[in-house]
């Protein structure tokens, strides 16, 4: 267990009021936890910006599986990058549409490249990379 440090900061009252209102709206029980989450977010962003650290990401894709060769294209690419692809969840949304959630691991620049390739496949209607983290640098 690491030491807990208390700190005081100077901040414009109006800014703090808005922050408090927002954190209440988001369900935070106290200001400290909201600030800790912001700091962690900042560190995850840095992990991604650095490009060389091992991290985790989630790629979400929505596509029409009727588009010619799209499904095999997606599968081929994931086999080709199997060291980065940790797990894939496929949901048949309706007669035409599929949702795929792909958990990926690797250096952030490699994950970005893979996500761009997946999202760029013809027939993908919506694609998004969500930055996650290995959690190692965070407490
Ligand atoms: Ni499907």
Image (tube, grey):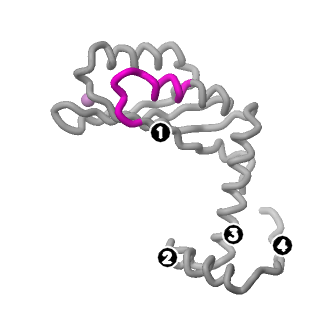
* Residue under pointer 3: 35
Instruction: Say whether residue 78 is left or right of residue 109.
Output: left
Give the Cα separation between the discs numbered 2 and 1. Answer: 26 Å
* Residue under pointer 1: 128
Name which of mark 4 and mark 2 comes first in the sequence.
4
Give the Cα separation between the discs numbered 3 and 4. Answer: 13 Å
* Residue under pointer 2: 25
Name which of mark 3 and mark 2 comes first in the sequence.
2
Where is residue 105 drawn, in percent x and y? Answer: 59, 31
Q: Callout 4: few (<14), some (14-19), or many (20+) C-alpha neighbours within 10 Å?
A: few
Choose top left, top right, bottom left or bottom right for residue 23.
Answer: bottom right
Give the Cα separation between the discs numbered 3 and 1. Answer: 26 Å
Name which of mark 2 and mark 1 comes first in the sequence.
2
* Residue under pointer 4: 5
Name which of mark 3 and mark 4 comes first in the sequence.
4
Above or below for 47 versus 122 = below
Q: Which residues are magenta?
A: 114-126
């Amino acid at each position: 267990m690491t030491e807990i440090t208390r700190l005081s900061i100077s901040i414009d009252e109006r800014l703090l009021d808005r922050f408090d209102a927002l954190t209440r709206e988001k369900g935070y029980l106290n200001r400290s936890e909201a600030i800790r989450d912001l700091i962690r977010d900042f560190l995850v962003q840095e992990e991604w910006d650095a490009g060389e650290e091992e991290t985790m990401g989630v790629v979400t894709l929505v596509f029409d599986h009727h588009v010619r060769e799209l499904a095999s294209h997606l599968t081929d690419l994931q086999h080709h990058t199997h060291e980065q692809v940790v797990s894939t969840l496929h949901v048949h949304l309706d007669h035409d549409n599929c949702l795929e959630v792909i958990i990926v691991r690797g250096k952030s620049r490699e994950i970005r490249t893979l996500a761009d390739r997946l999202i760029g496949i013809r027939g993908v209607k919506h694609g998004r990379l969500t930055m996650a983290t290995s959690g190692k640098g965070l407490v």
